[in-house]
């Protein structure tokens, strides 16, 4: 009689611990506010172009460059590196360019969520050496990475108010 009780108690405690302490691998996907996120660039801009630059090839080992429009790689979920081009309207941190290119490296759990002609709040960090090779960039090119599962925050009046409250006034791109 005591064994079933211990089993149920152990299962309940295990479930509680797993619920309270989720898998740390998912931590990158947690939504945070701008003042909680350490980013190298923070800007609001409209996504004007999305290009697949690398993919997993079924007959190759590792990644290959994408030379076509990349739509097949997005459909069959073999896309790995994306180059996202934004027309920038406001900048809080980082270079104040009119056009910014940000890379996104997809993983098995992430997918392509950003939609062209939509304005987003972008928080990105410098590309690591490993990420540079994933998108075929050299070591001297300045480049930034959007977290793989980030959808970016769609730019709304509420988001703008929250960002200005957290980060202060923005500047215009040059």
Image: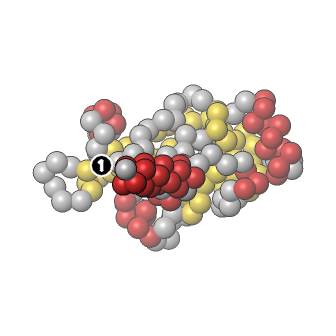
Decide: is 30 above or below 87.
Answer: below
- At label 1, counting other C-alpha atoms closer than 10 Å, the crowd grade (few under 14, some 14-19, many 20 or more) is many
* Residue drawn at 27 percent across, 36 percent down: 76
In this rendered view, identify the residue nearer to me: 154 or 82.
154
Say if residue 15 shows up in the picture. no
Decide: is 27 above or below 160.
Answer: below
In this rendered view, identify the residue nearer to me: 11 or 67.
11
* Residue drawn at 73 percent across, 30 percent down: 156
Rendering coords of residue 72 (x, y %): 27, 34
Please state if 164 lies on the left or on the right of 37 as rendered. right
Please state if 141 lies on the left or on the right of 57 as rendered. right
In this rendered view, identify the residue nearer to me: 62 or 14.
14
Rendering coords of residue 166 (x, y %): 82, 49
Please state if 107 lies on the left or on the right of 64 as rendered. right
* Residue drawn at 49 percent across, 67 percent down: 128
Circle 1 sits in a helix, a strand or a loop, which is it? strand
Say if residue 170 shows up in the picture. yes
In this rendered view, identify the residue nearer to me: 24 or 89.
24
Q: Mark 1 points at which residue?
A: 55
């Amino acid at each position: 009689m005591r064994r079933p009780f211990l089993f149920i108690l152990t299962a309940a405690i295990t479930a509680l611990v797993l619920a309270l302490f989720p898998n740390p691998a998912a931590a990158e996907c947690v939504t945070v506010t701008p003042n909680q996120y350490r980013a190298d660039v923070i800007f609001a801009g409209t996504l004007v172009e999305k290009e697949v630059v690398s993919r997993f090839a079924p007959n190759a080992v590792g990644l290959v460059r994408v030379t076509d429009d990349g739509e097949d790689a997005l459909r069959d979920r073999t896309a790995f590196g994306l180059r996202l081009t934004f027309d920038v309207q406001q900048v809080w941190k980082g270079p104040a360019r009119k056009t910014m290119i940000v890379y996104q490296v997809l993983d098995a759990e992430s997918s392509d969520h950003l939609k062209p002609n939509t304005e987003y709040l972008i928080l990105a960090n410098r590309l690591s050496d490993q990420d540079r090779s994933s998108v075929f960039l050299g070591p001297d090119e300045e480049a930034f990475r959007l977290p793989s599962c980030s959808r970016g925050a769609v730019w709304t009046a509420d988001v703008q108010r929250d960002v200005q409250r957290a980060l202060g006034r923005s500047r215009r791109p040059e």
